[in-house]
Amino acid sequence: MQIIGQKKVDQAAQDHADWRASLRNWITVVKGADWANDNDIQQTFNTADPVGFYVVFNIAHNKARLVSIVDFADERVTVKEVVSHAKYDRKNYR
């Protein structure tokens, strides 16, 4: 999969040292993924959840959320934002 918006992930990793390893792992896994549907994502990341038009990944043992749009046909994951769990809970992604 191609990652669009990786700068957002890199910035979050720079800003939050405790998220860094988890975000780097996410990048590595997603770049090597061959997903056809949400079930494939959940087999790779069992805590990932489809939420409305988005797929939300838990990062750093539930400390953060990576909100994305996955385009299976174009094999693209677009990162919308990487936020703390608390900030995510204040937004409405549905």
Image (spheres, grey):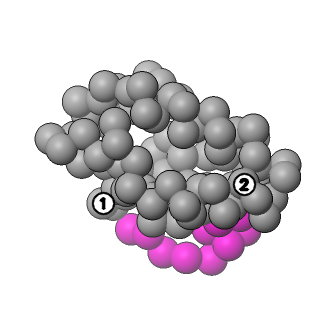
Towards the viewer: 54 or 24? 24
Q: Is residue 86 visible?
A: yes
On residue 13, the disc is 2
Q: Classify 10 Å Cα crowding around label 1: few (below 14), some (14-19), many (20 and above).
A: few
Where residue 84 sits in the image (x, y, percent)? 71, 64
Mark 1 vs mark 2: in front: 2
The secondary structure type at the circle numbered 1 is loop
Seen at 55% across and 76% down, the residue is 91
Query: Farthest residue in the right direction?
Result: 18
Seen at 30% across and 29% down, the residue is 35
For the C terminus, the image quarter is bottom left
To which quarter of the image does residue 13 belong?
A: bottom right
Where residue 59 sits in the image (x, y, percent)? 66, 46
Where residue 40 sits in the image (x, y, percent)? 34, 26
Towards the viewer: 52 or 19? 19
For the N terminus, the image quarter is top left
Q: Is residue 50 visible?
A: no
Instruction: Find out whether residue 86 is within the magenta segment.
Output: yes
On residue 53, the disc is 1
Q: The disc labelled 2 sits on which kind of residue?
A: Ala
Q: The disc labelled 1 sits on which kind of residue?
A: Phe
Instruction: Find out whether residue 91 is within the magenta segment.
Output: yes
